[in-house]
Amino acid sequence: MSDPVTKADPQAAVPAGVVFREFLTIGATSFGGAVPYLRQGLVTRRAWLNEKEFVELLSISQSLPGLNATNMAILVGQKLAGRMGAALAILGMCLPGAIIMFAVGIIYRTYGDHSITSAALKGVAAAAVGLILATVVQLGKKSLVEYADYVFVAITVVMVNKFHQSVLTTLVVVGLLSVLWHRPGRSAAKE
């Protein structure tokens, strides 16, 4: 059975129930970070967003307080189905994780000091880093167009890791530099 809105007309209003179901699926299957699953579900499978829109909404989500996935759920839910879509998207995104964490908390309380538990957590951590790296590479191919973009990435990494600047300070400084570099009319002024 197919959903009423899938790839046919991504600009059409999406029923809030379909938005809830998609975010429930993403929330239930996104282990180690939701960004790859969000991209897969919203851009590749549903075509509700194109790559540019996804990167823009992800940038907004990352610059706001809170988790990227929940911020993204609110923004995309609102875009697709209004206020009800935003509310159901965040509920769908958070519900599976809340249920799973409740169950894992009970299990961890009982079996947390076993070596098998520690080994499993280390394996999950390694997989999470791999998923994040894969997403960075995929988004980087689409977003980093000029050499200057790579310079901004390098400046960000150095500011946070080497100089221990806060993420907020780094975003403001590098963001302003990037906006100045990519400002409209810059290419016309160069010519």
Image (cartoon, rainbow, N blue to C red):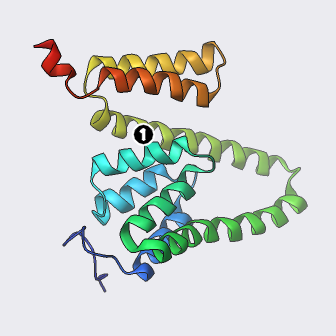
Q: Is residue 159 above or below residue 120?
A: above
Quarter of the image for residue 42 reads bottom left
**Residue furthest toward the bottom?**
1
Quarter of the image for residue 190 reads top left
Q: Nearer the viewer, residue 94 or 166?
A: 166
Q: Nearer the viewer, residue 184 or 26?
A: 184
Point 42% across, 40% down: residue? 134
Q: Nearer the viewer, residue 158 or 119?
A: 158
Residue with the mark numbered 1: 134
Point 24% across, 68% down: residue? 11
Residue 70 placement (x, y as % from top left) = 56, 58
Q: Residues within 10 Å of mark 1 (few under 14, many from 20)?
A: few
Q: Would you say residue 158 is visible in this rendering?
A: yes
Q: Is residue 1 above or below residue 79?
A: below
Point 50% across, 62% down: residue? 74
Q: Would you say residue 33 is visible in this rendering?
A: no
Secondary structure at badge 1 equals helix
Residue 117 placement (x, y as % from top left) = 78, 51
Residue 76 placement (x, y as % from top left) = 42, 62
In the picture, the quarter occupied by the N terminus is bottom left
Compared across the picture, whether 177 is left or right of 7 comes to right
**Residue furthest toward the left?**
191
Residue 188 placement (x, y as % from top left) = 13, 20
In the picture, the quarter occupied by the C terminus is top left
Compared across the picture, whether 116 is left or right of 92 comes to right
